[in-house]
Image: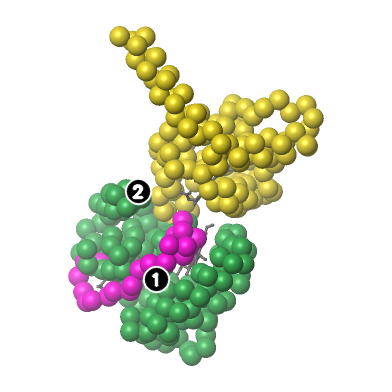
Chain colours: A yellow, B green
Amino acid sequence: MTPTRYAIGFLCAFGLASTAIGGPRETLIDRYAAAAKAADAGFAGFSAARGETLHRTQYNMGKADTPACTSCHGNDTRSAGRTRTRKPIEPMALSVSPERYKDIAKVEKWFKRNCDEVLGRECTPLEKGDWLAYMMNQ
Amino acid sequence: MNIPVRPVVAGLLVIGLTAAVLTKARAGGDDYFPPVKDKLTVDECGSCHMAFPPAMLPAASWRRMMVELDDHFGDNASLDPQTAAHVTRYLVDNAADAGGRRYGRKLMKGVPAGASPQRITELPKWVREHDEVSRSEWQHKDVGSKANCLACHVDANDGYFEDD
């Protein structure tokens, strides 16, 4: 029973993943990977673990009331967050918000705004790729 | 997709508020401000706070706001020029002294012609309508900001600012 379920789960996940190949998310990741490699020849792929650190670290380098990504997006990637004006933000985990990260211009726009809010600078392609790897794993 | 979630969240917020604020917000007249119907404007102006109805500010306000988006109340809300032009046109066309006059006129009392106030929450008429709301109600954790209209006006996204 359990192994069968695992197998089915695996096939479904695989099926989903393969239908996504060549989609806008992959284009985006490829783009960040190329830029990360150009910046550092030793680049060896994105890391969800580094992405999680980026997401959770209290940087305090941007605006006072938003020290971390979690200040708005919340501690649980699968639950809603909220903006400073208290508007709910849908969860960031791809598993619960399957429509996310398809619109490249939208992703870029918010990385630019939010990295500035939290880090006081833009995020590097490596940071963006790591963060997306984390959310796509969630 | 978003539609079923928001009213639920707004509903939950409201339950947390004092009954007094609620009764007050529910009582009263016919204040309807047509909600934003333009998709691009909802997307670009409705992610950090509700997309405020264009009839709540005069055209000069929207024009000024739209060229100062890189420092929008301390946030960077800037848009590419094409998107900005589209959104500006929509807001200006439906402003309180343009297409939205019928609805917006009442909020414009005391605003000098040609002025470009940037906050709805600082319009003299808005301040007067809210002078019964106490400090503790504004500071309630589910309100947090005067600009969080939805905390008290549950149907604000449909254009209704009192009754629900």
Q: Chain of mark 2?
A: B
The residue depicted at 53 percent of the width and 48 percent of the height is A103
Q: Is residue A82 visible?
A: yes
Residue at label 1?
Answer: B53
Q: Nearer the viewer, residue A86 or B132?
A: A86
Whether residue B132 is in magenta: the answer is no
Q: Residue at x 68, y 48 (%)?
A: A122
Subunit of label 1: B
Image quadrant containing the N terminus of chain A: top left
Of the residues shown, which amino acid type is indicated by label 2? Answer: Met
Query: Looking at the picture, how far across and down is residue A35, in whole percent?
Result: 73, 39
Instruction: Kindly identify which residue carries mark 2.
Output: B1
Q: Amino acid at mark 1?
A: Pro
Marks 1 and 2, Cα distance to the nearest angstrom? 21 Å
Q: Between B80 and A138, which is closer to the camera in this rendering?
A: B80
Image position, residue A8 (x, y; %): 37, 18
| Camera sees residue A62 | no
Does the magenta stretch mainly form a helix, a strand or a loop? loop
Badge 1: residue crowd in 10 Å (few <14, some 14–19, many ≥20): many
Specify the segment rendered in magenta. B25-47
Q: Position of residue A43 (x, y in %)?
A: 74, 28
Q: Tag on residue A89?
A: none
Query: At 67% across and 39% down in the image, what residue appears?
Result: A32
- Residue at point 38% right, 67% down? B37
Does B54 sit left or right of A58 as displayed? left
Instruction: Reply above or below: A3 against B65.
Output: above
Mark in front: 1 vs 2: 2
